[in-house]
Every structure is written in structure tokens, then in C-alpha cells.
Amino acid sequence: MGWVVGWKKPNYDQTGAPSPLTAIALTELIRVPTLTVMEVHIKPETQTRLTELASKSGRAPDDLVEDALAGYLAEVTEVREMLDGRYDDIKSGRVKPIDGEAFFDSLRQREDELLKQRNPK
């Protein structure tokens, strides 16, 4: 990592002699990420939709693809973190897994009871 350096006035020692110039960091060098080109193959129908949307929105197709991909990746990351958390909850015993078939049978039974209450015939 590089630094932008400035020089400050010399300090004087006990004898009154100036000490050598001292380098001080004024700001930290900021590295700008470089863009890499990635070729993405899409279906002709998707390309047509992308071109139409770009035309209607006034945005470049590359910008639309970047926004869509960034949103998708953020959503996948969020889902992955949620699933990892749920798995950790089950593994630690904080929550108990339930049988899927038993749950859906119970759900259907409750739905049938609600329907009978609404339409007593």
C-alpha cells in the first residue's frame, strides 16, 4: 500500500541543530479497482427484452445487466445467510425440525375446518 507523503519543518534537538526532514503521511493512497471484461451469453429473446428496456429507460444495456446481476447476487447472499442461520439453529437444538408430511396434513385439516365454519351445510 502506498502513501502520499509530505515533509514537515525540521525539529530541533537539544543543541538547537535541525533534525533531518521527517516524512509524514498526509493521506492514504486509494486503490481504484480495475474493471474486468466478462463475456455473458444470453438467449436472443432475453437480448431483445434487454434492448427494448434499455431503449425505453434511456439506460445502457450494460448498466441494466450490472444492476440486475448485483441485485440477484445480493438476494442469493441474503438467502444463503438465512439458510445457514436456520441450519445452525437446528444443529444447536434451538429449534426442532418437523416432519413435512405431518405439517401439510395438519395444514389441510385446519383449512378444511375453516371452510366448514364458513359454509356450514
Image (cartoon, rainbow, N blue to C red):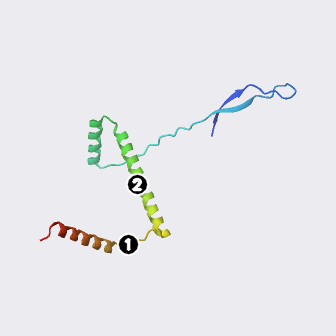
Task: First in sequence, mark 2 or 1: give its number.
Answer: 2
Q: Image height check: is 31 above or below 96? A: above
Which residue is pictured at 41% across the width and 71% down the height?
A: 97
Could you classify mark 1 by the number of other residues whose Cα lies within 10 Å: few (under 14), some (14-19), or many (20 or more)? few
Q: Is residue 114 left or right of residue 19?
A: left
Q: Which disc is residue 98 wearing?
A: 1
Q: Is residue 5 left or right of residue 87?
A: right
Q: Image height check: is 100 above or below 55? A: below
Instruction: State the image coordinates of residue 96 (x, y, percent, origin top left).
Output: 43, 71
Q: Which disc is residue 76 wearing?
A: 2
Dot 2: what SS?
Answer: helix
Q: Quadrant of the C terminus?
A: bottom left
Q: Which disc is residue 12 wearing?
A: none
Give the residue type at disc 2.
Val
* Of 48 and 29, the residue lying toward us: 29
Q: Quadrant of residue 50?
A: top left
